[in-house]
Each structure stands twice: as structure tokens, then as C-alpha cells.
Image (cartoon, rainbow, N blue to C red):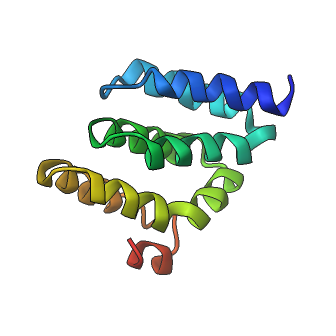
Amino acid sequence: MAVKDDYQDFKNALNDLKINSKPLINFLTILAEEKIHNAPQIVRAIEERILETKGDYVLPVLYVLDSIVKNLRSTTYIQLFENKLPVIFASAFNKVDERTRLAMFKLRQTWPQYFSGGTLHNL
């Protein structure tokens, strides 16, 4: 499948994620695994969704990022996300309420084994 098709398919599925839905998060994680050859486009779709969406939808998308990193353990995805994580996280943080910020903080606390201390310090 073409790069553009993989990107669009993932983006469309990601746009359906409006609540914390474990089945859809798992589906997106499996899709990311199948499309690892186009990992930069998958990461771009996640980044764009977080940057462009309203605050209510941010946390579920961060859970997709988290699921890809933790379940696939792919250095490709980890490196791509690490480069963008400070911008993604800051954008998300600025859009959400205090309760969601607390959930983001708890999520961030689970990442030291995946992302460098420098990156996490910048969050």
C-alpha cells in the first residue's frame, strides 16, 4: 500500500477515537505495527491529531502513542516519538483541564524506560 494510503487510513481511524476506547486503541496499535514501514507517517498522524484536536480528544490519542511505544517496543517508533514528544505533550497540556493534566502526568511517569531523561525533563 502506498505511503499516502497508510497515512490516511491511520488518520481516519485515529479521528474515530473520541473516548478512551481500549478496543480502538488496540486496533490502532496493531495497525501501527502492520504499517511500521511507514512509521514516520503514523507518527505524523498522531502528532497532527494532538496538535489539531480539541482538548477532550487529546488524552485518548496520547494513550495510542503510549500503547504503540509500550506494546511494540519498536526503536523506530520510540525514536520518532522522542523527537516530537516535548511539542506534542506541551500542546496537549495547554488544551486540557486539571483532571486530564493529572492523567497526563501519571502517563509520563511510566515512560522513563522508553524515553531519555532529557526528553522527559522537557515535558
> Quick check: can you spot residue 114?
no
Residue 110 picture quarter: bottom left
> Quick check: can you spot residue 33?
yes
| Residue 103, placed above or below residue 109 | above
116 sits to left or right of 102: right
* Image quarter of the N terminus: top right
| Residue 41, placed above or below residue 35 | below
The percent coordinates of residue 99 (x first, y second) are 13, 49
The residue nearer to you, when weighing 41 against 72, is 41
Residue 101 picture quarter: bottom left
The percent coordinates of residue 42 (x first, y second) are 66, 40
* Image quarter of the C terminus: bottom left
Q: Residue at x 31, y 53 (%)?
A: 107
Q: Residue at x 46, y 50 (%)?
A: 51
> How many numbered markers are drawn?
0
62 sits to left or right of 94: right
The residue nearer to you, when weighing 48 against 112, is 48
The percent coordinates of residue 83 (x first, y second) are 61, 66
61 sits to left or right of 116: left
| Residue 12, placed above or below residue 54 | above
Direction left: furthest residue: 99
